[in-house]
Image (cartoon, rainbow, N blue to C red):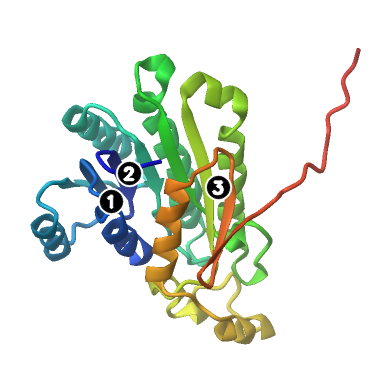
Amino acid sequence: MDLAGKNVVYLGGFGGIGQKCVQELLQRKLKTLAIFDLTENVDILANWKAENPETDIFYQKVDITQKSDIEAAYKATADRCGHLDVVVNGSGLMNDRLVELTIQINLLGVINSTLTALEYMDKSKGGKGGLIVNISSVAGLQPTPLMAIYSAAKTGVTTFTRGMANPIYYAHTGVGFVTICPGFTDTGLLEDIDNKTTFTYHTPMLEMFKKVKRQTAEVCAQNLVKAIEQAKNGAVLMLELGETQEIDIPPHWTPKLDI
């Protein structure tokens, strides 16, 4: 997809990876960029507007745990833009001590945002189609016992997004889906990890976790935006240490038909 002239929504645009992705996206001469986030970063937003005067950049306050916030933000954005081309669901929390909030932000929020965005993008409902990118994690590809609840939420994101990418849905809506699974990325999510694990007692897994190589948020963002530009509906992409790898997830079950 050529992003020039496109209308893009980014959820979590003031976050660690989110800021770098926004900066990368703005280099593509977007028509509109709507940033959905809980708290506005006034200084960063002002800088982006000053450096990109030809792009309409604006902020919508969204508590991703509140469906009413999500619906109001999409309506306001659609009213302003006319249509949506790309949505990136990038809001995230990694703290297994906050069980309900981890599920609400990482999984339920992604689901509600996706289904709401489809109301404006679905060709069968007057939209123009487009692309929805949901950010999962390597923890959404295989269990991460140290963060079992986070891993469960991100696995849900991966499975949900793959389900939404079904060719039958794509033919109906014209909206493609891509799952992005970053490896360890140097952002605030990984800070104070001792107080975010599933259990409070010390395990060897924690020491191993601290030694895992990390990529920078800038490198992750560069590959994420490239993934949007080269998007293939249904792709599951692992962004690890500066490289992008498409993950093949084979079927493990085929239903038996009663005929």
Q: Residue furthest top?
A: 259
User: Badge 3 is on which residue?
Assistant: 157
Q: Is there CB contact under 8 Å for labels 1 and 2?
A: yes
Whether residue 129 is situated above or below residue 162 in the rendered picture: above
Q: Quadrant of the C terminus?
A: top right
Q: What residue appears at the point 54 percent right and 41 percent down from the top-left corner?
A: 232
Q: Residue furthest right?
A: 259
Q: Nearer the viewer, mark 3 or mark 2?
A: 2
Q: Is 70 left or right of 195, judged from the image as shown?
A: left
**Residue 3, disc:** 2
Q: CA distance from mark 1 to mark 2?
A: 6 Å
Dot 1 crowding, Cα within 10 Å, few <14, some 14–19, many 20+: some
Q: Is there CB contact under 8 Å for labels 3 and 1?
A: no
Which amino acid type corresponds to the residue marked 2 in the rendered image?
Leu
Q: What residue appears at the point 46 percent right and 30 percent down from the top-left corner?
A: 175
Estimate the x, y position of residue 236 in percent, counting from the top left. Answer: 59, 49
Q: Tell me which label, 1 or 2, sits earlier in the chain.
A: 2
Q: Which SS class for mark 1?
A: loop
Q: Tell me which label, 3 or 2, sits earlier in the chain.
A: 2
Dot 2 crowding, Cα within 10 Å, few <14, some 14–19, many 20+: some
Q: CA distance from mark 3 to mark 1?
A: 27 Å
Query: Which one is nearer the viewer's eye here, 171 or 113?
Result: 171
Residue 38, visible in the rendered structure = no
Estimate the x, y position of residue 77 in percent, counting from the top left. Answer: 22, 35
**Residue 28, disc:** 1
